Image (cartoon, rainbow, N blue to C red):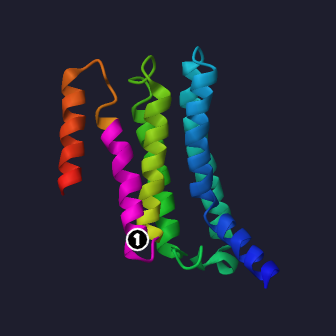
Amino acid sequence: RRSLERSALVLSLIAFSPEILLTACALGLICYDALLPERKATIRWIALGSMVLMLAATGYVAANMQALAGPHFAGALLLDGYTTFARVLFGCAGILVILASWDFYAERSVAEYFALFMLSLVGEVVIVAGTSMLMLFIGIELLAIPTYALVALLKEQEMAVEAGLKYFLLGMFA
């Protein structure tokens, strides 16, 4: 029985390895920036590489879809064609967003931006893969909370901080 539970957990971890990798890379970006603050230019490359790594893991999972398709993590998340399509769509969109913001965040607080953005992408996939209202709620929160901070990220601009506060209050009361 225990080995069966372990193998189910391993299959679940493999099935959702793109999201696990993206979360680990987002947290790694924050740690990298804290330990090496003078290397801001490489953070953009790490973020781009993280998105490519997420798409590569998605390709691996899609190639092994027959063995991995179905419910995972005790039925909380479902791996199917829609989840795979959402991963590819959000991953490609994420790469385009990183490339579009490449020059704007050249000298600003880049690690926070890219880490929050990647965490919001994880929330998007959890929304698609969730099988219950609880997972839908967790996915929406994983999407919304980083975007509250993203709106107010440019702390030197009063309008950005005000917009972030208004967005947070709107989300809290909605």
Which contiguous range is marked in magenta?
A: 130-149
**Residue at 73% across, 69% down:** 10
Percent x, y for residue 148?
31, 42
Q: Please tell me whether residue 141 belongs to the stretch shown in magenta.
A: yes
Is residue 25 rendered magenta in the image?
Answer: no
| Left or right: 126, with 12 as reference point | left
Q: In the structure shown, which secondary structural element does the residue marked by tag 1 occupy?
A: helix
* Residue drawn at the location 50% of the way across and 29% of the way down: 111
Give the vertical position of 90 relative to 82 (above or below). Answer: above
Question: In the displayed structure, does residue 29 sit left or right of residue 66?
Answer: left
Residue type at mark 1 is Leu
Q: Main secondary structure of the magenta part?
A: helix
Point out the image quarter for the C terminus.
bottom left
- In this view, which residue lies farthest toward the right? 3
Taking the spot 47% from the left edge, 36% from the top edge, the residue there is 114
Counting labels gives 1
As drawn, 62 above or below 91? below
Image-quadrant location for residue 3: bottom right
Instruction: State the image coordinates of residue 34 (x, y, percent, origin top left).
Output: 58, 24
Residue 1 screen position, x and y as percent: 79, 85
Dividing the picture into quadrants, the one containing residue 99 is: top left
**Residue 5 as seen in the image, left or right of residue 62:** right
Extreme residue in the top direction = 38
Compared with residue 137, is residue 173 higher up or lower down, i.e. above or below? above
Which residue has dot 1 on it?
134
Q: Position of residue 22 (x, y in %)?
A: 57, 49
Query: Image quadrant of residue 106?
Result: top left
At horizontal 24% and vertical 36% (from top left) the residue drawn is 164
